[in-house]
Amino acid sequence: MPSVPVLRPTDPTALREIRARPGDRRRILFTNGAVVTMDPDLGALDPGDVLIEGDTVLAVGRRLEAGTDAVVIDATGCVLTPGFVDTHRHAWQAPLRRSMPDVEDLAAYVTTTLAGHAPAYGPEDMYVGTRLAALSAIDGGVTCLLDFSHNSRSAAHSDAAIQALADAGIRGVHASMAPHFGQWDGQWPRDLGRLRERCSGPLLTLRLAALATDEIAGPRLAYGPELARVARELDIGVSVDAVLGASSSHAVRAWAGQDLLGPWVTLIHATGLADDAWKAIGGTGTTVSLAPTSDAQIGLETAIPAVDEALAAGVRPGLSTDVEVALAGDMFTQMRTLHTVQRMRAVHGAYGTGRTPDRIGVRDVLDFATLQGARTNGLDPVTGSLTPGKKADLLVITAEELNNMPLNDPVGTVVLGADARNVVTVLINGEPRKWGGRVLDTDLAGLRTRVHETRNRILGRKPHPTRSPV
C-alpha cells in the first residue's frame, strides 16, 4: 500500500485533500471495500480497490498502487458501486412532491398536474423544481438523471431546467418536450437545435421527448416520422413516454414498419403491450425504461411492471422514478419494488403447477439500475459500471450501520438493506458531490425558501416558516 495517510470516506480531511489537488490530475484510491463493478467481465471483488485519476476510473483490482500524491480512502465496511441511473423523472414537479399520494389513476394525475398546475410554472419554478430533484437524486446515489422535461413553455423554461442540472453537478439528460396543455411559445421542436448546443458540456446530453400516441395531448406530441426526422438530423436520442396498452402496441408496430425504432429510442413504461409489439422492440434493439412504482401504484394498464415481457424479448431494461407528486423518488425503492413484484408474480404463476418459478435476483435489479440504465440513456460507454476507462461515477455505501450490519452479501445489502443515509460518498465525473453523508455545494436553507415559494405559488397556499425542524 502507498506510504501516505489513509483516511475514511466520512473524514472531512479527505475531502479537503481531494479538492486541494487539480481536478484533471488528482488520484483517489478507494481501498479494501467490497467492490461491485457491474462490469460482466470484472464482476465483484471483496475486498477490492478502485483507483480514480481525474474524471476517470483508472484501475480496479486488489492492492493497487497509486503513488505518493494520491488521496487514499479506506473503504473497509463499505460497498463501492457505480452510481444509479434514473431513466425517466419529471424533475420540475419536485416542489409538488406527494401532493396527491393516493392518486386514483392516470387521468387524475394528468388533470391535476399537467392540466392544472403545469401552466402556472415560470422559468424560476422550472429551475427550482429541477434543481431540487437533481440534488435529492444525488443524495440517494443517482449520478445520472434523465429529466423528462415536458413543461417547456418557452426557451427560458428549457434554459432554466438545463441550468439547474448543470448547477447541481449531476450527469444530466435533458429530454425536452412541449407542454400537454395551456399556453406556450410554440418553440418546440424548433428550439432543440439551440438546446443541443447548451447541452454540449461533459455532463449534459439532450434527447427529444415525446408521447406514444395522441390520446392525451393531441398529435403534435406523438412520436412518428416527423419527430424521428428531427432527432436524426440533430443526432440525438428519443424518449417516448406513456407507452401503454393496445393503442401503444399499434403505434410500436407502425414505428417498426417505418424504421423508427432502434437503440436510440427508449420506450417508457411499456405496460400492457401485445406480444408482437414486444417482438418488434426486441428485434430492433429498442431500449425500455420501466417505472415499477408508477405502474403499480397509479395503476397503469395491467399495473404490473413489464420486466418479464422485456426479458422474454431480449431487453434488459433501465429503471425510473417518474412522478414524485405521487411516488417515491429514490432508486432503492424502484429496485425493491421490481424485485418483489416480479418474484411474487413468478411464484403465483407457478403455484400448483409443479413448475419452478423463473425469478429475477438482486444482481438483476442492480444491473437494471446501473449499467442497463446507462445503456437506456445512451451513455453506457461513459457510465453505468466501474470499468477502467469509464467516467468515475461512484458510490460508497456504508454497510456497518444499524440497518445493514453485518455485511454478508454486498449486492443484497445495496438492493435490500441500504437507503440514502448509507450513501456517504458520491462522485460524479470524479468530482465529490456528496461526502460524509452531506450533499456538497448547496445552500440548503436558500433552496428550501425557494422551493416553498414555488410550492405556495403553484398550489395557492399561504406562506409559512421554512426552517427545518431539526
Image (tube, rainbow, N blue to C red):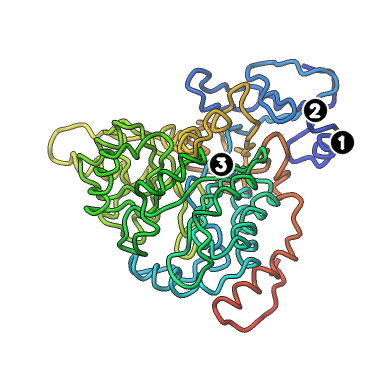
Cα separation between marks 3 and 1:
33 Å
Nearest-to-viewer mark from 3 and 1: 1
Front-most of 203 and 370? 203
**Residue at point 67% right, 80% down?**
464
Q: Quadrant of residue 28?
A: top right
Cα separation between marks 3 and 2:
32 Å
Label of residue 26 in the image: 2
Label 1: which residue?
20
Q: Residues within 10 Å of mark 3 (few under 14, many from 20)?
A: some
**Residue at point 68% right, 35% down?**
429
Percent across and percent down for residue 334 are: 44, 48
- Of mark 3 and mark 1, the one earlier in the sequence is 1
The N terminus sits in image quarter: top right
Q: Quadrant of residue 95?
A: bottom right
Residue 153 sits above or below residue 38 on the image: below
Question: Horizontally, is 352 left or right of 315 in the view?
Answer: left
**Mark 1, secondary structure of its residue:** loop
Residue 25 sits above or below residue 462 on the image: above
Cα separation between marks 1 and 2:
9 Å
**Residue at point 73% right, 38% down?**
431
Kind of residue indicated by mark 1? Ala
Kind of residue indicated by mark 3? Asn
Label of residue 404 in the image: 3
Front-most of 376 and 213? 213
Residue extending farthest to the left is: 353
Q: Residues within 10 Å of mark 1 (few under 14, many from 20)?
A: few
Label of residue 28 in the image: none
Percent across and percent down for residue 296 are: 34, 55
